[in-house]
Amino acid sequence: MDKSIETKKEEAVSRMKRLGLPQEMVRQFEQDGYIGISEPPVGAFYWAEGEDLQHIRNFEADYNALVYVVIRSFTTIGKIDSYLYVSNYPEEWEYERKLLDRNTPSVYVYNHNAPECSELGEIGIRRSIEGRLLQEW
């Protein structure tokens, strides 16, 4: 069953609040559809645009999902973006919320240096001093 974009957006807003993301970021996602990218070292937020936004939209179309925030990391294998998203399967949402509460959300990891190595999985996250999101593992 295909869940509507509005239902997914409601779930995404709930998850953003659950993560304690800045109110302005939640509001701009909810009202205008802006997706924030949290980038190290302190997790400063930038709005996804250009090529970044195109990669997000491609993932959403391929997986019928809704991305609500991206955590960018610079690793030994290059620049990666972890997309936190709402899946198209409401029966899995409760489990996905539990993962979020454990700071181990389900994500799609986009590998900028080797896109063919991008994959679904889980990551460990933490909050910076400013309350932004950073990837731990």
Image (cartoon, rainbow, N blue to C red):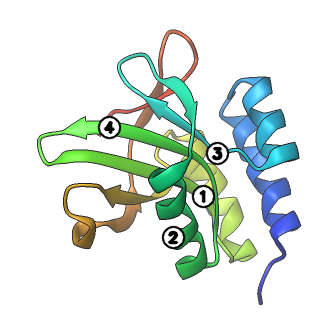
Mark 1 vs mark 2, foreground winner is: 2
Mark 3 vs mark 1, foreground winner is: 3
Alpha carbon separation for disc pair 3 and 4: 16 Å
Whole-percent x and y of residue 111?
Answer: 28, 57
- Disc 2: which residue: 59
Secondary element type, mark 1: strand
* Mark 1: few/some/many CA within 10 Å (<14, 14-19, 20+): many
- Residue at 71% over, 44% down: 34
The image shows residue 85, relative to residue 89, as above or below, that is: above
Secondary element type, mark 3: loop
Residues under numbered marks 2 and 4 in contact, where contact means CB atoms less than 8 Å apart: no
- Disc 1: which residue: 85
Specify which label sits upstream in the sequence, 3 or 1: 3
- Disc 3: which residue: 35
- Nearest the camera: 85 or 99? 85
Mark 3 vs mark 4, foreground winner is: 3
Alpha carbon separation for disc pair 2 and 4: 18 Å
- Residue at 88% over, 44% down: 31
Amino acid type at image mark 4? Ser
Whole-percent x and y of residue 86?
Answer: 66, 62
- Nearest the camera: 107 or 124? 107
Whole-percent x and y of residue 59?
Answer: 51, 70
* Mark 3: few/some/many CA within 10 Å (<14, 14-19, 20+): many
- Residue at 36% over, 59% down: 110
Asked whether, in this view, residue 55 is left or right of residue 130, the answer is left
Check the picture and name the quadrant holding the N terminus. bottom right
- Disc 4: which residue: 73
Amino acid type at image mark 1? Tyr
Residues under numbered marks 2 and 3 in contact, where contact means CB atoms less than 8 Å apart: no
Specify which label sits upstream in the sequence, 1 or 4: 4
